[in-house]
Image: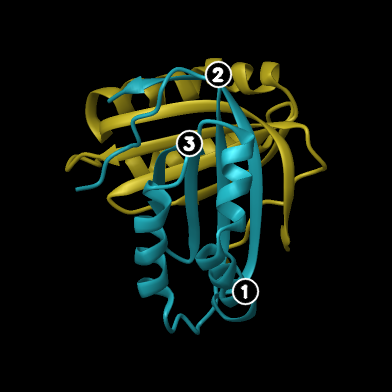
Chain colours: A yellow, B cyan
Amino acid sequence: VAATASTPEPPYVAVIFTSVRSDDLEGYADVEAELDRLAVDQPGFLGVETAGGALGITVSYWASDDDARAWKGVAEHRAAQVLGRERWYRSYQVRVATVTRAYGVP
Amino acid sequence: VAATASTPEPPYVAVIFTSVRSDDLEGYADVEAELDRLAVDQPGFLGVETAGGALGITVSYWASDDDARAWKGVAEHRAAQVLGRERWYRSYQVRVATVTRAYGVP
Protein backbone atom coordinates (compact mmCIF):
# COMPACT_ATOMS: atom_id res chain seq x y z
CA VAL A 1 0.00 0.00 0.00
CA ALA A 2 1.36 3.40 -0.95
CA ALA A 3 2.08 5.69 1.99
CA THR A 4 3.98 8.86 2.69
CA ALA A 5 7.03 8.42 4.91
CA SER A 6 6.67 8.97 8.65
CA THR A 7 9.46 11.35 9.56
CA PRO A 8 10.31 13.08 12.85
CA GLU A 9 10.19 16.81 13.52
CA PRO A 10 12.65 18.76 11.35
CA PRO A 11 15.49 19.31 10.92
CA TYR A 12 16.54 16.19 9.03
CA VAL A 13 18.08 15.52 5.63
CA ALA A 14 16.30 14.72 2.36
CA VAL A 15 18.12 13.28 -0.64
CA ILE A 16 16.05 14.03 -3.74
CA PHE A 17 16.97 11.75 -6.62
CA THR A 18 15.28 12.42 -9.95
CA SER A 19 16.03 10.44 -13.09
CA VAL A 20 14.95 10.00 -16.67
CA ARG A 21 15.06 6.30 -17.35
CA SER A 22 16.54 4.77 -20.46
CA ASP A 23 15.01 1.95 -22.50
CA ASP A 24 17.42 -0.55 -20.92
CA LEU A 25 16.10 -1.34 -17.45
CA GLU A 26 17.58 -4.85 -17.24
CA GLY A 27 18.27 -5.68 -13.61
CA TYR A 28 16.81 -2.42 -12.37
CA ALA A 29 13.84 -3.77 -10.39
CA ASP A 30 15.90 -6.42 -8.57
CA VAL A 31 18.65 -4.02 -7.60
CA GLU A 32 16.14 -1.39 -6.49
CA ALA A 33 14.36 -3.91 -4.24
CA GLU A 34 17.67 -5.04 -2.73
CA LEU A 35 18.75 -1.45 -2.09
CA ASP A 36 15.42 -0.70 -0.41
CA ARG A 37 16.06 -3.58 1.97
CA LEU A 38 19.60 -2.43 2.69
CA ALA A 39 18.70 1.22 3.20
CA VAL A 40 16.29 0.42 6.01
CA ASP A 41 19.14 -0.97 8.11
CA GLN A 42 21.50 1.96 7.53
CA PRO A 43 22.31 4.24 10.47
CA GLY A 44 20.10 7.31 10.44
CA PHE A 45 17.63 6.03 7.84
CA LEU A 46 14.24 7.67 8.42
CA GLY A 47 12.18 6.67 5.40
CA VAL A 48 11.88 6.69 1.63
CA GLU A 49 9.27 7.66 -0.95
CA THR A 50 9.35 6.60 -4.59
CA ALA A 51 7.19 7.50 -7.57
CA GLY A 52 7.89 6.18 -11.03
CA GLY A 53 7.21 6.76 -14.68
CA ALA A 54 9.18 8.36 -17.48
CA LEU A 55 10.53 10.65 -14.78
CA GLY A 56 11.35 8.83 -11.56
CA ILE A 57 11.62 10.54 -8.18
CA THR A 58 12.94 8.90 -5.02
CA VAL A 59 13.31 10.90 -1.83
CA SER A 60 15.15 9.28 1.06
CA TYR A 61 15.23 10.83 4.52
CA TRP A 62 18.17 10.71 6.93
CA ALA A 63 18.89 11.85 10.45
CA SER A 64 22.03 13.70 9.36
CA ASP A 65 24.11 14.68 6.36
CA ASP A 66 26.79 12.22 7.48
CA ASP A 67 24.23 9.40 7.42
CA ALA A 68 23.20 10.33 3.88
CA ARG A 69 26.85 10.43 2.77
CA ALA A 70 27.54 7.06 4.37
CA TRP A 71 24.69 5.46 2.41
CA LYS A 72 26.15 6.87 -0.79
CA GLY A 73 29.36 4.97 -0.04
CA VAL A 74 27.87 1.54 0.75
CA ALA A 75 29.32 -1.02 -1.68
CA GLU A 76 26.03 -2.34 -3.07
CA HIS A 77 24.78 1.19 -3.52
CA ARG A 78 27.97 2.25 -5.31
CA ALA A 79 27.64 -0.68 -7.70
CA ALA A 80 24.06 0.35 -8.44
CA GLN A 81 25.18 3.94 -9.06
CA VAL A 82 27.56 2.68 -11.75
CA LEU A 83 24.82 0.61 -13.40
CA GLY A 84 22.50 3.58 -13.20
CA ARG A 85 24.95 5.92 -14.89
CA GLU A 86 25.96 3.41 -17.55
CA ARG A 87 22.66 1.75 -18.31
CA TRP A 88 19.44 2.74 -16.59
CA TYR A 89 19.40 6.53 -16.62
CA ARG A 90 19.44 8.88 -19.54
CA SER A 91 19.96 11.71 -17.06
CA TYR A 92 19.69 12.21 -13.31
CA GLN A 93 20.05 14.73 -10.53
CA VAL A 94 20.83 14.26 -6.86
CA ARG A 95 19.99 17.10 -4.50
CA VAL A 96 20.84 16.96 -0.82
CA ALA A 97 18.67 19.21 1.32
CA THR A 98 17.95 20.06 4.93
CA VAL A 99 14.25 19.89 5.75
CA THR A 100 13.36 22.95 7.81
CA ARG A 101 9.60 22.53 8.21
CA ALA A 102 6.95 19.95 7.43
CA TYR A 103 3.20 19.54 7.69
CA GLY A 104 0.45 17.38 6.31
CA VAL A 105 -2.20 14.78 6.94
CA PRO A 106 -0.76 11.35 7.71
CA VAL B 1 9.45 14.71 -22.81
CA ALA B 2 10.40 13.92 -19.23
CA ALA B 3 13.37 15.88 -17.92
CA THR B 4 14.96 16.70 -14.62
CA ALA B 5 14.71 20.36 -13.62
CA SER B 6 17.59 22.69 -14.46
CA THR B 7 18.40 24.45 -11.21
CA PRO B 8 21.20 26.89 -10.30
CA GLU B 9 24.04 26.26 -7.87
CA PRO B 10 22.77 25.68 -4.31
CA PRO B 11 21.56 27.00 -2.00
CA TYR B 12 17.93 27.17 -3.10
CA VAL B 13 14.66 25.86 -1.68
CA ALA B 14 12.89 22.59 -2.50
CA VAL B 15 9.25 21.97 -1.59
CA ILE B 16 8.71 18.20 -1.51
CA PHE B 17 5.02 17.32 -1.81
CA THR B 18 4.10 13.65 -1.48
CA SER B 19 0.54 12.38 -1.60
CA VAL B 20 -1.53 9.25 -1.63
CA ARG B 21 -4.35 9.85 -4.06
CA SER B 22 -7.94 8.97 -3.38
CA ASP B 23 -10.33 7.32 -5.83
CA ASP B 24 -12.00 10.66 -6.54
CA LEU B 25 -9.71 12.59 -8.90
CA GLU B 26 -12.44 14.65 -10.57
CA GLY B 27 -10.97 17.94 -11.72
CA TYR B 28 -7.48 17.00 -10.63
CA ALA B 29 -5.73 16.95 -14.02
CA ASP B 30 -7.19 20.30 -15.13
CA VAL B 31 -6.28 22.07 -11.91
CA GLU B 32 -2.78 20.57 -11.90
CA ALA B 33 -2.15 21.76 -15.46
CA GLU B 34 -3.40 25.26 -14.60
CA LEU B 35 -1.21 25.42 -11.48
CA ASP B 36 1.82 24.31 -13.50
CA ARG B 37 1.21 27.23 -15.85
CA LEU B 38 0.80 29.68 -12.95
CA ALA B 39 3.84 28.47 -11.00
CA VAL B 40 6.21 29.20 -13.88
CA ASP B 41 5.36 32.90 -13.64
CA GLN B 42 5.79 33.15 -9.86
CA PRO B 43 8.72 35.17 -8.48
CA GLY B 44 11.63 32.89 -7.65
CA PHE B 45 10.29 29.82 -9.45
CA LEU B 46 13.22 27.66 -10.57
CA GLY B 47 11.61 24.44 -11.76
CA VAL B 48 9.37 21.51 -10.93
CA GLU B 49 9.53 17.72 -11.17
CA THR B 50 6.52 15.42 -10.91
CA ALA B 51 6.17 11.65 -10.81
CA GLY B 52 2.84 9.95 -10.39
CA GLY B 53 1.21 6.72 -9.41
CA ALA B 54 -0.43 5.46 -6.24
CA LEU B 55 2.10 7.65 -4.46
CA GLY B 56 2.61 11.00 -6.13
CA ILE B 57 5.70 13.16 -5.65
CA THR B 58 6.07 16.73 -6.85
CA VAL B 59 9.18 18.72 -6.03
CA SER B 60 9.16 22.43 -6.82
CA TYR B 61 12.27 24.56 -6.59
CA TRP B 62 12.42 28.18 -5.47
CA ALA B 63 15.05 30.87 -5.12
CA SER B 64 14.09 31.55 -1.50
CA ASP B 65 11.88 30.40 1.33
CA ASP B 66 9.83 33.60 0.94
CA ASP B 67 9.17 32.72 -2.71
CA ALA B 68 7.97 29.24 -1.73
CA ARG B 69 5.68 30.70 0.96
CA ALA B 70 4.26 33.25 -1.48
CA TRP B 71 3.30 30.49 -3.93
CA LYS B 72 1.50 28.68 -1.12
CA GLY B 73 -0.66 31.79 -0.66
CA VAL B 74 -1.64 32.39 -4.31
CA ALA B 75 -5.45 32.25 -4.60
CA GLU B 76 -5.68 29.53 -7.26
CA HIS B 77 -3.18 27.44 -5.36
CA ARG B 78 -5.08 27.87 -2.09
CA ALA B 79 -8.30 26.73 -3.77
CA ALA B 80 -6.50 23.65 -5.08
CA GLN B 81 -5.15 22.90 -1.60
CA VAL B 82 -8.70 22.81 -0.28
CA LEU B 83 -9.84 20.46 -3.06
CA GLY B 84 -6.79 18.30 -2.42
CA ARG B 85 -7.48 17.96 1.29
CA GLU B 86 -11.21 17.38 0.83
CA ARG B 87 -11.25 15.22 -2.28
CA TRP B 88 -8.07 14.17 -4.08
CA TYR B 89 -5.70 13.08 -1.33
CA ARG B 90 -6.07 10.31 1.18
CA SER B 91 -2.95 11.64 2.90
CA TYR B 92 -0.14 14.05 2.06
CA GLN B 93 3.04 15.60 3.38
CA VAL B 94 4.73 18.88 2.53
CA ARG B 95 8.39 19.26 3.42
CA VAL B 96 10.24 22.52 2.85
CA ALA B 97 13.99 22.05 2.54
CA THR B 98 17.14 24.00 1.72
CA VAL B 99 19.22 22.31 -0.97
CA THR B 100 22.86 22.40 0.13
CA ARG B 101 24.54 20.43 -2.67
CA ALA B 102 23.60 18.91 -5.99
CA TYR B 103 25.21 16.85 -8.73
CA GLY B 104 24.20 14.71 -11.68
CA VAL B 105 24.17 14.24 -15.41
CA PRO B 106 21.84 16.65 -17.20
Quadrant housing the C terminus of chain B: top left
> x%, y% of residue B69?
63, 46
Residue at left 55%, top 51%?
B71
User: Chain under label 2?
Assistant: A
Q: Is residue A94 above or below residue B55?
A: above
Same chain for marks 2 and 1? no
Horizontal side, residue A25 vs residue B87: left or right: left
> x%, y% of residue B104?
36, 21
Residue at image mark 2? A74
A102 or B90, nearer to the observer: A102
Q: Is residue B72 above or below residue B81?
A: above
User: Chain under label 1?
Assistant: B
Marks 3 and 2, how far apart at CA:
36 Å
Mark 2: which secondary structure? loop
Marks 3 and 1, how far apart at CA:
24 Å
Q: Is residue A27 something that shows in the picture?
A: no
Residue at image mark 1? B82
Q: Quadrant of residue A7?
A: top right
Which of the marked residues, 3 or 1, is nearer the chain's N terminus? 3
Residue at image mark 3? B44
Mark 1: which secondary structure? helix
> x%, y% of residue A14?
62, 33
